[in-house]
Image: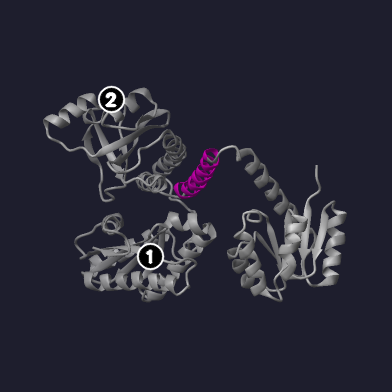
Amino acid sequence: MDRARILIADEDFVLSRTLTWLLRDQGYDVAVAPGGRGVMDHLKVTSPDLLMIDVGDQPADGYQLLERMRGEEQWRDMPVLVMSPQAPDEMSMQVLKFGATDFLSKPFHVRELLARVRMQLRVRREILHARHALRSTEVELAQVRTEAEKRRQLVDILQEVHGDFSPEELYHILTRRVAHALDISHCSLILARPGDELGIVAAAYETPGLRHLEIELKRYPEIRAALESSLPVLVEDVATSPLYAEAREEWTIASNDVKVRSVIALPFRIDGMEAGVVFLRTLDGEPSLKVSDVDFADDVVKAAVSAIQRAQAMESTRADNERLEVLALTDSLTQTLNRRALMDRLDSELDRARRYSLSLSLLMVDLDHFKAVNDSFGHLAGDEALRGVARVLQREARSVDVVARYGGEEFVVILPETGEDGAVKVAERIRARVAEQATEGLLPMPALTVSVGVATVLSTQIQAPEELIALADEALYRAKAQGRNRVCT
């Protein structure tokens, strides 16, 4: 096996010589570039597997070099380990933004340095191996990238559904996250068993406020087929599928303009018995659902089912044994309240509003096109966008207001003693401020916007926190449907 080649670009002669001796002793080929400006020439000569560069004295030159490397196909995938005497908080985000793959503060420990080098070279080998294996076709490369993205989405979804939620909350999380991940407009969860005449819609992404709607299963051949066979049903074209032959005749007689283009009916089992179907649809003008969508949704549902079973078991024991576990109150990424703390505070505010006949408003804030932010700028930038929006919300909130992360890219702001007019003003101020911060460069990407749903109630109108959240979620859905970057009530 060829020895890995490392290029050191550091004007500190003593450190360069020490690093050269240390790395050669580990079996690496080492070359030294005596200055930052000549690094590109040395790259062309040595073609290293890893570049170690010091940007401490001339950070602007280092940033320019990193940008130039990432702009050339030959060096785009080469790992770059940046060394600097500055603290990580001052430099790491900046150099990673410009394309570095790792950052190490000076002075450093030898073991840590060697571990970082080994890790970067291992990643380099894996990337080269993957590129060689996939070079035969661009289609195969696209498939691998798609699968990698779906695996990331799956991990993200699993982290959320394995929180401490009730079964009903999990139904809504599941439908919302599957719809977001597959970028589809309709996703619902129907509770039913084989042979049932009626099903219960427990959650619907397209109608967040819907609760326990009964449907006649004879009108849904795909749901009946999935329940009876215990297998997923995929229909890529409703207009031509034999499964819908009888239904199409009924639609024609009733002059029903059915706009559904493709469907997936995905059955799931709880405690070994058929329990229902996750029902995905796309409409005319939207891409058809494919086999890959079935596989992805099936993985999500199987994982969610275990969480639902656990939630049901916890609910059955709550009546006899009150839980003693103390739940954390703060979301680790955004430093806002987490969902559990939100529900506790919202319940308290609703109780106070009822007791004193006060108004109460709630804002549901959602980052627009958040998936595109992650795809274009990376997940570190996506995390920073969430933190940036959280900072805006906290700055614009009054001391009595409550800011919480509801899940994913959604935030909630509780506005006690605030009517609709005041809540809309706050929401518009938040929306405008987020857009201003993006254009002013205070957020990590341009054109970042949010949509806001506003729900306002008097003390007698709402009895449970979920009802108020559902109203705000419906308003947010309207804001999204009307083009995003807007406020709807």
- Vertical comparison of 179 with 279: above or below: below
Circle 2 SS class: helix
Residue 179 visible, this orientation: yes
- The Cα–Cα distance between marks 1 and 2, rounded to whole angstroms, is 42 Å
Question: Front-most of 154 and 128?
Answer: 128
Point out residue 341 in the picture as x, y percentages from the top left corner.
41, 61
Viewer-proximal residue among 371 and 191: 371
Q: Locate residue 288: give its quadrant.
A: top left
Q: Is residue 358 something that shows in the picture?
A: no
| Circle 2: residue type | Leu
Q: Position of residue 55 (x, y in %)?
A: 70, 71
Residue positioned 81% across, 63% down in the render: 32
Pick whichever, 229 or 416, lies toward us: 229
Q: Position of residue 269 (x, y in %)?
A: 40, 31
**Tag 1 secondary structure:** loop
Q: Which residue is mark 1?
A: 449
In the picture, the disc for residue 425 is none
- Please say whether residue 158 is one of the residues in the magenta stretch: yes
Disc 1 or 2, which lies upstream in sequence?
2
Is residue 135 part of the magenta span, yes or no? no
Tell whether 56 sits left or right of 278: right
- Residue 469 is left or right of residue 337, and the answer is left
